[in-house]
Amino acid sequence: MMLRRRALAAPGPLLATPVAARAQQAGFPDRPIQLLVGFTPGGNIDLAARMVAPFLERRLGPGATVTVVNRPGAGGTIMPNELARDGARAEGHMAGFAAFPALVAALHDGNAARYRLDSFAYAGLLTDEPYTLFVAATSPYRTLAELAAAARTGGPEAITLAGAGAGLASTPRMAMTLFERAGGVRFTWVPMQGAAQALQLVQDGHATGAISTVGLTVRQHREGGVRILGVMAERRFPGAPDVPTFAEGGFDVRIGSARGIVLPAATPAPSRLRWAAAIAAIAADPAFRALAERDNVIVRHLDQAGLTAMVAAEDRALAAEARMTGQAPEQAPRPR
C-alpha cells in the first residue's frame, strides 16, 4: 500500500453564528483543557503538541489553559480509547492530538482499539511530515542500498529498525513494510512506546536504525547526532537538502504522519466551532509558521470537512491493506 496524501479541496474556515458565538462566550472554555497525546514525552508527536498548545490557549478564548497529557501504550490506542470513553462529559475541554493514518490503522489491526471512526469529530489538521530512516552517526551504512544489501546477505535479523508502535497500527512499522516490499528484503522491527525511545536506542547502538518524521530527525542529522539515509517523500526536505528521497535511492516509498485535533463526537456544536476556528487561525499565524519552520515541522491545514474526507479515504486504503496482509480483525467493530 502506498499512502499518498493529496491536497483536498475544502471550504474556508467555519464561522460561528451569533447564537453560537454567544454560547461560546458564555460556556466554553470555562475550565482547563486537556490535549491528550498517545505517545511518550519527547517524541515527534509530543513535541508538535507542545508547540501547538500555547497557540491554542491564545485562540480558544480568554483565560484558556491547555495542558498536554501523555497517554502512551497499546500502540497509541490508549489515548483515543480514553477520549472516546470519557470525553463526552468534557464538553470540548478534552481533545486528542492525533496522528494519521495511525488513528485509523489501529481499527484494522486487532482489537486494541475501543473506538470507531464516528467516535470523534475531526476538528482540523495542522501538520503533515514525511518519515525518514536514520542510523547512528557512526554507522557503517551510508545509503539505503547498503542497508538493503546487508539485510539480503544476513537475513531479517541482520538489520533491526526501531520505531513507535507495532503491527499495522504503527505507521513507522508500516513504512518499514513498504521499504521491504520495494527492496525485496526483510528487517526486524523493534517496537517502542515513542519515537524518542527509538532515537535513543539507535544512538546507544542497540538498533541498526529507526524510522521517524523529519520533525524529530532533521536537527539531529544536521548536528551530527544521527545520519538520515532517506526521506519518504516526493522531493527532498528543504531542511536537509543533502538527504535523498527513497525514490532517489531506488525505493518507491512515500509515507508520513499528519497531525490534527479530534474531539469526542458528543462535543457541543459551539465548542466544535471554536476549535475549528482556532485551528484555522493557528495554521495561518506567521508566528506559528515560523516556529514550525524552525522545528522542521510542515504546516498543512485541513478544516473539518477536509480532515473528515482524508480519514475516510485512509480507512478505505487501510481496509484493503489489512485484507491483503491477512491482518484484518475478525470481530472488531467496523467504523461507520
Image (spheres, rainbow, N blue to C red):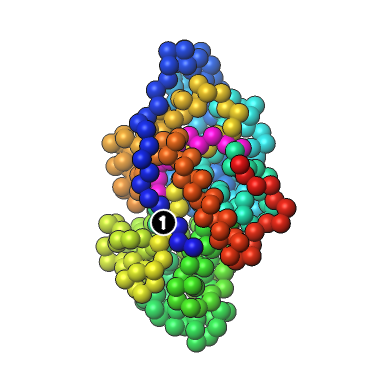
Amino acid at dot 1: Arg
Type of secondary structure dominating the magenta stretch: strand
Q: Quadrant of residue 302?
A: top left
Is residue 270 among the parts visible in the rendering? yes
119 or 277, nearer to the observer: 119
| 2 relative position to 120: left or right | left
Residue 254 lies, in percent from the top left, at 40, 62
Badge 1 marks a residue whose secondary structure is loop
Q: Does the magenta stretch include residue 190?
A: no
Identify the magenta region.
Answer: 119-128
Please give left or right for residue 302 compared with residue 294 in the image. right
Q: Quarter-wise, where is residue 54 in the image?
A: top left
Residue at the image point whose x is 59% and y is 32% from the top: 265
Residue at x-position 59% and y-position 33%: 264
Q: Looking at this view, is 109 or 146 the one in front?
A: 109
Q: In the image, residue 90 lies at what x, y percent? A: 61, 27
Question: Which residue reaches farthest bottom?
Answer: 153
For mark 1, what is the residue? Answer: 4
Q: Can residue 53 be seen?
A: no
Give the tally of numbered discs: 1
Above or below, comparing residue 161 to residue 214 in the picture = below
- Which residue is drawn at the image coordinates 54% and 63% (left, top)? 173
At 50% across and 78% down in the image, what residue appears?
A: 185
Image location (x, y in percent) of residue 158 = 54, 81
333 is higher (above) or lower (below) than 265: below
Q: Position of residue 23 (x, y in %)?
A: 50, 14
Q: Which of 17 and 67 is in front in this view?
A: 17
* Quarter of the image where the C terminus is located: top right
Say few, some or many: other residues with alpha carbon within 10 Å of mark 1 (under 14 / 14 to 19 / 20 or more). few
**Residue lying farthest to the right in this orientation:** 331
